[in-house]
Amino acid sequence: MTDLDILHQAWSLCQEWDEIYNTWRIKAFLALDSAEIEEMIQKFTKKVNKLAKEVKGWDVFTITRDRIAQTKRTIPLLQDLKNPALRPRHWGQLIEEVGKSFDPESAEFSLEKIISLGLDQYAELISNLSAAASKELSIEESLKTISQAWSVLELDIGPYKEDKGYYRIKSTDAIFELLEDNQVTLSSMKASKFFLAFEKEVDYWEMTLFRVIEIIEITLQVQRQWMYLENIFVGTEDIRKQLPKESTTFDSINKKWKSILQKMRADKLVLKAINQQNILEEMNDMNAKLEKIQKSLDMYLETKRQSFPRFYFISNDDLLEILGQAKDPMSIQPHLKKCFDNLYKLELLLAGSDNRRQSEATGMHSGDGEFVPFANTVTIDGKTFF
């Protein structure tokens, strides 16, 4: 009776295994839950180990035990084949290696089909393929992260002299921070042997980021020069008369710069904003012309300093302000102490008729409050010093 009871348990185990295995055997592979299969096999293994102490070596038990063990050995294979990192290119590679055609997404691709194809004999190959797919997945996800970040990154552009419709790039910290991070990431990818599947995409992003750096840097360079020269050439008639050719060139640049920045502000997204037609060529052209204008301006200021050496004591900005407001003596007063030691200001009065009134200097004040009258008054006009 004891033997019959044990034999009954062995046949029950066999029947129970057949029933559950048959559900796995015909089920579509992609619908199989490898974690569930592994859990069930562990339960059956415990039953087998418990029953093994009492059985008499019956075939029903040994065959069932061997079938469970064989299925257990396929668990790593199932896990490798169900790796979500596997892409069509990996399946294509496996089909080529095995030399047998199958469709992993079809309903016919089941556990039974895997065994009949003999894929269990390629367990090591599949394991290596799955491991490579996981490594490639990390590269794929990194590229996706890079793409998503640039798809929403906007240029920080704000108004500059809003009444004139000008704009300027306010900050590029976020752009250069992202550029630095992405360049390090792309370099790490290229150092990996698993990047070959993404070589074209990696090359695309390297070229794209290089273009972003190139355009943003030249744009900031042009912006710095433009902001400086705009204050000089827009609305300062004296300077424009002295440098007519440069003024005409700057007017052309000014118009083009205004148009480009307005388009950048409308586009907002960095990658879209820098994709204006011929923007890099135009920026380089403007930069070269602005540098020539700056050189001409420096030469012009040098001639003024040579004609009145005390101008060597003051900066270009101060000198430009003096030259630009030569007709307004009161505006020039703050610069006198930079040219003459302790000369705080001149004592000025208006003289002449209503039609031709002009300023005359009658004396000078020191920073200590001392006043020295002039023996003769000095008429102040735009050509007094220069």
Image (spheres, grey):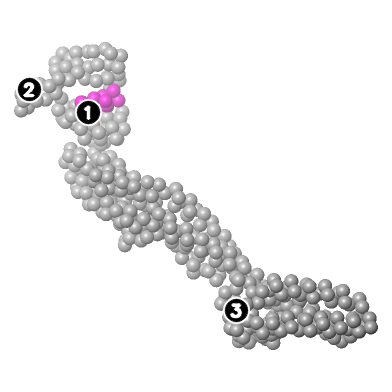
Q: Which residue is mark 3?
A: 91
CA neighbours of label 3 inside 10 A, class few (<14), some (14 to 19), many (20+): some
Q: Earlier in the sequence, mark 1 or mark 2?
A: 1
Q: Which residue is mark 2?
A: 352
Q: Which residue is mark 1?
A: 331
Residue at position x 29%, y 35% from top? 317
Q: Is residue 84 visible?
A: yes
How far apart, in angstroms, are the residues tagged by discs 3 and 2? 98 Å
Residue 105 quadrant: bottom right
CA neighbours of label 1 inside 10 A, class few (<14), some (14 to 19), many (20+): few
CA neighbours of label 2 inside 10 A, class few (<14), some (14 to 19), many (20+): few
In magenta stretch: residue 375:
no
Give the number of the mark in front: 1 or 3.
Answer: 3
Q: Which residues are magenta?
A: 330-338
Percent of width and height locating residue 175: 44, 52
Identify whether 255 is placed above or below 205.
Answer: above
Looking at numbered disc 2 in the image, what kind of residue is underneath it? Gly
Q: Which mark is residue 88?
A: none
Identify whether 212 is placed above or below 134.
Answer: above
Q: Earlier in the sequence, mark 1 or mark 3?
A: 3
3 lies left or right of 175: right
